[in-house]
Image (spheres, rainbow, N blue to C red):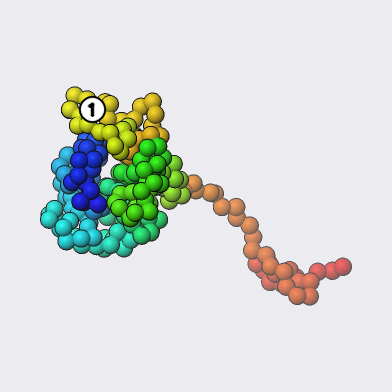
Amino acid sequence: MRAWCRQPLGQALSRVEQQQLCDILSDVFGYHLVVLDPACQPDAMASSRIQHCFVQTLSAEGLHQAPAMLANAEQLPLQSDSVDAFVLQHALELARDPHQVLREIDRCLVAEGHLVALGFNPFGWWGLRKLLLGWRGRVPWALRFISLPRLKDWLSLLGFDTLQTHYLFPHPPWQYRRKSPSDRGRLRAGRWPFLAASYVLVARKSVATLTPIKPRWRPRRSLLAGGVAETGHGSVPRHG
């Protein structure tokens, strides 16, 4: 994946995704931020206002971005309710069990913590190229593309609220061009979002509120054998 991100097409998509991450992370606050294996956006933490940021990676190459830790995304060596924000940069496509990755993120996030996820759009031009070239085993076309509606459903089952979504890079994989900073508004897919290359999703871990229920007190009463009712003053026989 890192090798593809260094190619012209990967670099073009990375620039768009990097800009969106900068805009989003500038509004996310907290104490701890974790970036899961940033293959294409090595500077994702630069715009974050969270002071303690570190990278979780599966390869030694990812350790070059200090601070970093070598760990499996399906089994994060982090305490429960300890992280304020997670950034997933196509991590679900690379994971063996994306559901387990989301469960681990749910476990580690604090209440009202944020999740920012980038993913490839399985539809449109990019989905067509994956269909044609996926059998060759080349990245990223051989990866498992997860659609934005499906990801929203998975997160909803875990109790997340989706705050915003954007489709990015509305260009076919054989046509791209570098965008200038003044052209930022056109980086998103407007009229034809399903043709976009990727998407970004921002979700928040919701907190379940318990509604107190006033108990209905009743005198303790249990039926015993022989037609005798037990009360607080002893047993009183019943007469037919």
**Vertically, is 186 above or below 91?**
above
Q: Which element is circle 1 on?
A: helix
Residue at 43% across / 49% down in the picture? 154
For mark 1, what is the residue? Answer: 184
The residue furthest bottom is 226
x and y percentages locating residue 128 in the rendered image: 40, 41
Please, what is the three-letter code of the amino acid marked with disc 1? Arg
Q: Quadrant of residue 184?
A: top left
- Where does residue 68 sit, x and y in percent of width and height? 16, 57
Q: Is residue 19 or residue 219 the one in the foreground?
A: 19
Name the residue at 35% across, 27% down. Answer: 190
Report the side of 58 relative to 191 (left or right): left
Instruction: State the image coordinates of residue 146 (x, y, percent, origin top left).
Output: 39, 47
Image side of residue 42 versus residue 75, left or right: left
Q: Residue 234 at what x, y percent from top left?
A: 68, 71
Residue at the spot 32% in from the left edge and 35% down from the top edge: 172
The quadrant in which residue 121 appears is top left
Instruction: Give the quarter of the image for residue 98.
Output: bottom left
Q: Nearer the viewer, residue 223 or 24?
A: 24
Residue at the far right in the pictured view: 240
